[in-house]
Image (cartoon, helix red, strand yellow):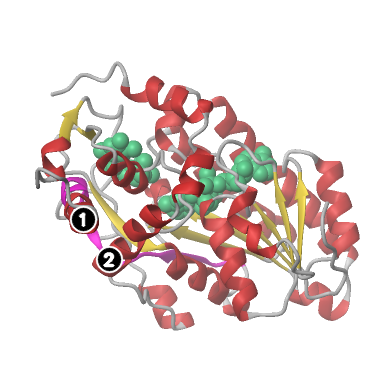
Amino acid sequence: MAGGSTTRDTVLVTGGAGFIGSNFILTWLQSTSSPIVNLDLLTYAGNPANLASLEHDPRYAFARGDICDPQLVAALLREHRPRAIVHFAAESHVDRSIVAPDAFIRTNIHGTFVLLEQAKLYWSSLSGPERAAFRFLHVSTDEVYGSLGAGDPAFCETTPYAPNSPYAASKAGSDHLARAYCHTWGLPVLTTNCSNNYGPFQFPEKLIPLMVLNALEGKPLPVYGDGKNVRDWLFVEDHCAAIRAVLERGQPGATYNIGGNSERANIDVVTAICDLVDEFCPRPAAASRRNLIAFVEDRLGHDRRYAIDAGKITRELGWTPAQPFEDGLRKTVRWYLDNATWVASVRTGAYRDWIAKNYADRLTL
Ligand code: NAD
Ligand code: TYD
């Protein structure tokens, strides 16, 4: 473990070396003096280089470990006495959950259970203002609500759960456990369900960074099915701002949907990426990267459309997304082009194995 923090203001973050967690920690420490302890196992998706700028920051401490380890979680809670836990740690990629669901059940369901149980014991030991102020913020996804048709209203907090992938089902299970710990024991849990994030530090197995890097390298751009599946996209820093708002002002026991008001069909996202890469790095023969688009065999059980009604968090907590999608996408493409060292550091042998496993045998349509 590096660094140290013992004040009552500390926040324990899980999964802080991943995409959203590292953006959360970086933006948190820009806007507040509260120390952060980051518990992360450093799976393939966790990268301490994301937080290299904090190496000498006394407000930041890192603990490498597993959220499924109750002794470790208890020891961290005893040592740091946090005022809150912000729980990001998860297996997060739908395609991997289709190939190998086991890790999703273990980390997302059992790991969340271990954290909730240890949080309950810790919170029960507090008294007075410390006990009243404690929060457990569980970061979840809109995918728990299932799939929408073209004309259906967007997901709101009362939409029934209907998860379709092993990833979504494991997150739904964790949401139900979080709810149960609040209902049964009064643990002050807040749950957020957010749409697709994009931005710096996203592991290049997800749509946007994968397409940026393939386009840059002149590789095929594998669009699943007819490319008309729709996702709502939110710039990661907007998600981080929403989590800060929920942590500070959210109602314990409540859930909040978070979205970007930016529904886009996958094919439109991919063509926009092609045009940005063409603009920043013109090809010598001036051939558009759009020529690289390849429609490939669909994802099993592929959800057609996600859309978020974020009216509750806007009305109750005053949060709205600040970054228009086209501006955020431009920034994101630029970030991947400017951070070749980071990109090289995450595209290890294990990464190449995953790409081969997911794409090599996929038929082109
Ligand atoms: P990510 O895959 O980039 O990062 C996950 C992090 O968790 C990694 O640093 C990994 O090392 C760590 N981790 C995994 N298993 C662990 C374990 N057993 N113990 C400790 N650490 C472990 O994920 P992300 O995209 O940053 O997502 C973070 C959270 O936000 C997840 O809970 C995800 O379900 C949720 N979410 C993500 C999105 C999105 O678009 N990426 C949207 C909505 C919600
Ligand atoms: P992804 O980034 O994996 O997020 P999620 O599945 O959680 O929404 O995928 C976003 C969309 O892009 C989804 O509809 C699947 C599609 N997709 C492709 O068409 N090709 C790809 O290579 C990937 C990774 C995703």
* Secondary structure type for disc 2: helix
Instruction: State yes or no: discs 2 and 1 in contact (Cβ < 8 Å).
Output: yes
Task: Say if 18 sits above or below 314 in the image.
Answer: above
The kind of residue on which mark 2 rests is Phe
The reply to whether residue 155 is in sight is no
Q: Which mark is residue 174?
A: none
Task: Say if 352 sits above or below 244 in the image.
Answer: above
Q: Residue furthest top?
A: 361
In the rendered image, residue 63, in percent from the top left (x then y), is placed at 78, 50
Mark 2 highlights which residue? 325
In the rendered image, residue 32, in percent from the top left (x then y), is placed at 66, 80
Q: Which residue is depicted at the point 49% across and 71% down?
A: 242
Residue 225 in the figure: left or right of residue 333: left
Q: Where is residue 296, by image quadrant?
A: top left
Q: Which residue is depicted at the point 72% across and 51% down?
A: 39
Q: CA distance from mark 2 to mark 1?
A: 9 Å
The reply to whether residue 17 is in sight is yes
* Secondary structure type for disc 1: strand
Q: Residues within 10 Å of mark 2 (few under 14, many from 20)?
A: many
In magenta, the rendered stretch is 253-271
Q: Quadrant of ligand 2?
A: top left
Residue 104 in the magenta stretch? The answer is no
Quadrant the C terminus occupies: top left
Q: Which mark is residue 264?
A: 1
Residue 261 in the magenta stretch? The answer is yes
